[in-house]
Image: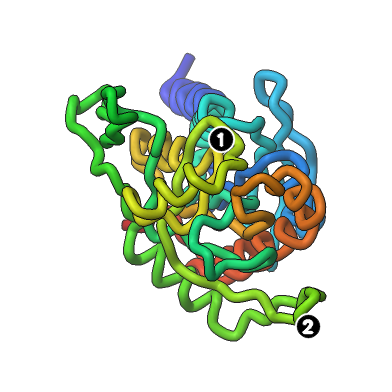
Amino acid sequence: MNSSYRVLATVLVALVAFPTAVLTQSRPIGVLGITREIAPIETRLQDSREVVVQGYVFRAGTINGRQVVVGRAGAGKVNASIIATLLIHHFNPSTVLFSGTAGAVDPGLRPGDVVIGATVVQYDAGVQTPQGVMPRGMRNAVTGQLDPLHVPTPETLMDVARRSAQGLKLPAIKAPEGDRVPRIVEGVIATGDVFLSDASRREELRSSLGATAIEMEGAAVIQTCRQFNVSCLVIRSVTDQADAQALNNYQQFLSVASENAAALVAAIITTLDVGLDKPLR
């Protein structure tokens, strides 16, 4: 084999060894969410195709000219970490966005309102004491360092989210007191492996952690992305008040909340710099 053939063979081996997304000029943006909650993002995909990885369904396509890969997560932190790891390993995204719904901890929030996760916290991970769980940051298995209890979103990514929210008009929601236009706010998103329908526990999380909204996946995806050096942002829209009526209200407002979260995520995708090939810091 002459030198030219050897070079060609080396290049072909390299192409096979790396995920297809690495070879594109710009890395895709990853979007994750629970199957029913991520549907409004999937409907926005153009020229989409299904990609199944280890049995998990992803859809690859474009939104407003940007390469996007959407992954369907199961409920809870373990399921969320699995899908995030597969997304990062197989598609090499520049940024990961999580789109979905949440229960309101802030009493000022109403169904359809959207929360941008300025920070996330795992409220059920830490040290169990007679007084309850004392939350603490998770330990990085590679460096041995503890993450902060409240993990912040990279400021550059928050800036993109803020710019995207400006001028985004969400449709009005009918309510007994009259039609209202949902708000977009920044706040603390608390993650745990339970669907919260307990007003007293909700108030504990508000007073102890400053939680704005509560859900079951976001902080786990953030932890996974930090481990693999990929920037990440969680976007949630409110379905319920995390009280005794939470399950009924979740079903009632699931569709509108999922759509509102997706609207902001789509705006963020459009606002992200074209040609982005490195994680935002």
- Residue labelled with disc 2: 178
Residue occupying image coordinates x 26% and y 29%: 140
Q: Label 2 vs label 1: CA separation?
A: 42 Å
User: Could one spot residue 176 in this view of the protein?
Assistant: yes
Judged left or right of residue 153, residue 9 is right
Residue 211 appears in which quarter of the rendering?
Answer: bottom left
Mark 2 Cα shell of 10 Å, populated few (<14), some (14-19), many (≥20): few
x%, y% of residue 254? 76, 53
Mark positioned earlier in the residue sequence (2 or 1): 1
Q: Amino acid at mark 2?
A: Gly
Q: Residue furthest top?
A: 1
Near-viewer residue (279 or 153): 153
Q: Which mark is residue 1?
A: none
> Toward which corner of the image does residue 90 lie, by quadrant?
top right
Which residue corresponds to mark 1?
A: 87
156 relative position to 66: left or right: left
Color style of the picture: rainbow
Element on which disc 2 rests: loop
Say which residue appears at 69% left-offset and 80% top-offset. 181
Percent position of residue 84, x then y: 53, 34
Q: Label 1 sits on what residue type?
A: Leu
Select label 2 or label 1 by which is in front.
2
